Amino acid sequence: MPRTGRLTTAAGLVAAISVLATACTGQSGTAAADDPKADVTIGFWHGWSAPGEAKAIEENIARFEKAHPNIKVKVTGNMTDDKINQALRAGGDKAPDVVSSFTTDSVGKFCNSGAFADLNPFLRKSGIDKAKVFPKTLMEYTQFQGNQCTLPLLNDAYGLVYNKDAFKAAGITEPPKTWSQFTEVAQKLTKANGDSYDQLGIMPTFHGYETTPMRLVAQWGPTYFTADGKANLAKDPAFANMLTAQKDLVAKLGGYEKLERFRSTFGDEWSAEHPFHKGLVAMQIDGEWRTDMAKEAGVTFEIGTAPLPVPDDQVADYGKGYLSGTIMGIASASKKQNAAWELVKYMTTDTEAVVAFANSIHNVPSTLAALESPNLRVSPEFKTFLDIARHPKSTTTPARADGGTYQLTFQDFAYAVEKGDVADIPAGLAKIDQQIDTDIAKAK
Amino acid sequence: MTGTHPLRAKRRRSALRTAAFMSPWLIGFSFFFAYPLLSTVYFSFTRYDGFRPPVFNGLGNWTYVFTDYPLFWPALWNTLWLVVAMVGCRVVFGLGIGLLITKIKTGTGIYRTLFSLPYLAPPVAGTLAFVFLLNPGTGPVNVLLDAVGLPTPGWFTDADWSKPALTVLALWGVGDLMVIFMAALLDVPKEQYEAAELDGAGAWSRFRHITLPNISPIILFAVVTGVIQVMQYYTQPLVAGKVSAGVIGGSGRQFEPGYPDKSTLTLPQVVYNAGFQRFDYGAACVVALVLFALSMAVTALLMRRRGGLIEAGD
């Protein structure tokens, strides 16, 4: 027995130490008392990784350093959100002063927790009227309850990218505008081959890269929350209607299981092996970058772009879409916030810098001036996305205290619906509302 | 009587010397075990996001985890499923291979190397290889199954097959157990087998009555360490789920582990999700403590039930 006891303790210790190694640390910082004119080196972390993108960042930073000879910027690329979150929490000398992230959904969490400094005082000090600089929708996803803890750094608009040759071969003359046309076109473009496909009209499942429930439901004009902040997914018919329409599309294109098997054969979204590049899917819900990526991958077919279709009863709003983008902020633990602000100000508000960056990485510019700039390189395919970005009914997902957790909850439900696991969508959405309210209350 | 008794002073010096020799362990124990454990217990009763100071919220996190956190129960179920299936299969398979190789007369070294090699592969690389091999559409396993007319599972894309697929992956890396079992098997006194053979015992009887009792402490060791390993199972299910879900290097999209249908979600992933993705350290600490308690309970149960056998094996 004593021997057993010792062994138990020893085994328990091993388990405990391993399990608890992920335990809890962290702190925060404040105040911007540094001199922005002093010689200083600031750290800037970003998530871009492709050689062309990294080069664009370097060029932008070189222009900044030329204009601000006292500030040196140490750039670290290819950073994931998880690493960024961890560094922000840990603080210290190695932590970044300026951070950019692709996950706009995290903004509510970043602002609510105080991970990023509020930029309102900096904007006021620099005499920048944010409402005159940035489009309204972009302001929605960069702040939370008045705390402007990030600013937009380039914008992403989501639309439809399609294979014009495949359209011609199927006798389709123009991109679909309504959801019923979309369903019809997707079926016409689908060439099944036993348990698989030679060509699929579109990969409709919510694991199909950018085909997320949030991007699709944006076409239905959803209201995620009521005025008093309660989840509104069950009451707003947009959500149930979108899920029903999408489930129908999944069924018409071969069913969930067959589609998921086909999807598992696809290559990496960011590589030349993307199924759209290889002609395996004829249409793709995607961002403005896809046309250039496809051309760089050497596709031989002609590419067309269009806004995503809208539900049949909202055809007057055709042209709208879902918007998100990259965000940029200053770590609240940074001791060099004034110098950091100079970089954030330059990258997010300087028209020349924004246009040059947008041109380099084929993103939609994030300021009103840059959108109108004559230096912006605009191809016909790219113009579609600029128009979506400018459309008054284009929307984004609202910032919440739990970051994007409410979206993940909705996404999980959407997975179950498309798979056929949900018999009663409205009842399921009511439960989702409860879950979202609970999670947000907990995060506040 | 005045002054200190010489014997008492000697004892005190001896106690101090012992404490001095023990101090490295004591310091290590305090910093790496006692402090993390106590702070985890403390944070489990607070609302804490890692940025703002923790605020005491009683049993709030505990209630949330057990009643409202949608990832907790599926992860607990998956973890227990994997503990039973994976540990069982790994022990049986590792012992089987060990037995087989100890019986082989020639080329033992080659087989030992062959079966040990996969264990050396980094977990991410091994998992990626299995996602490729078990790709439902193009993977060689399904091509082979199809060629012989057998049904082709969806493996990592099918919630019913994802955990069996992970178990197959775990069997591939069974080299560590095989080496331990081989050492134990070679340690069994040969004369016992010879005596049993003279008494007319068959192969199964010899295995049942000689091999098993002799190696039972090693089996217990394999089971206990296996349970602890599976309780910490994180990398392989995360990578398999992520790659199969099509989220490789994509940015701008949040990924919640568990694809498909939360079937590859394990408790350590939930600790990570709560703490580092949801910024909810309180809930993360609750899940960590549950995992800790579970590891302790399962280990204690195993040790208690098999305690007699250990003594016998000594």
Image (cartoon, coloured by chain):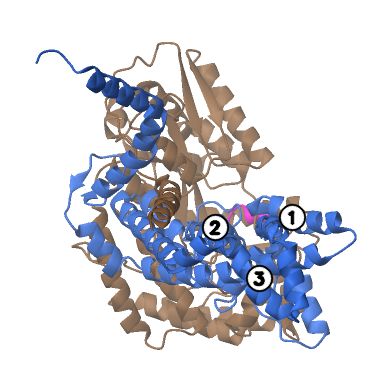
Chain colours: A brown, B blue
- Hey, which residue is sitting farthest top in the picture? A38
The reply to whether label 3 and label 2 mark residues of one chain is yes
In the picture of the structure, the residue carrying the numbered disc 2 is: B314
Q: Nearer the viewer, mark 1 or mark 2?
A: 2
In the picture of the structure, the residue carrying the numbered disc 1 is: B116
Q: Nearer the viewer, residue B114 or A297?
A: B114
Circle count: 3
**Amino acid under disc 1:** Ser
> Answer yes or no: do the residues labelled 1 and 2 have beta carbons within 8 Å?
no
* Residue B118: percent from left, percent from top: 73, 56
Q: Residue at x 70, y 75 (%)?
A: B206
Among numbered discs 1 and 3, the one appearing first in the sequence: 1
Give neighbour class at mark 3: few <14, some 14-19, many 20+ (Cα, 10 Å): some
> Answer yes or no: do the residues labelled 3 and 2 have beta carbons within 8 Å?
no
> Answer yes or no: do the residues labelled 1 and 3 have beta carbons within 8 Å?
no
Magenta highlight range: A287-291
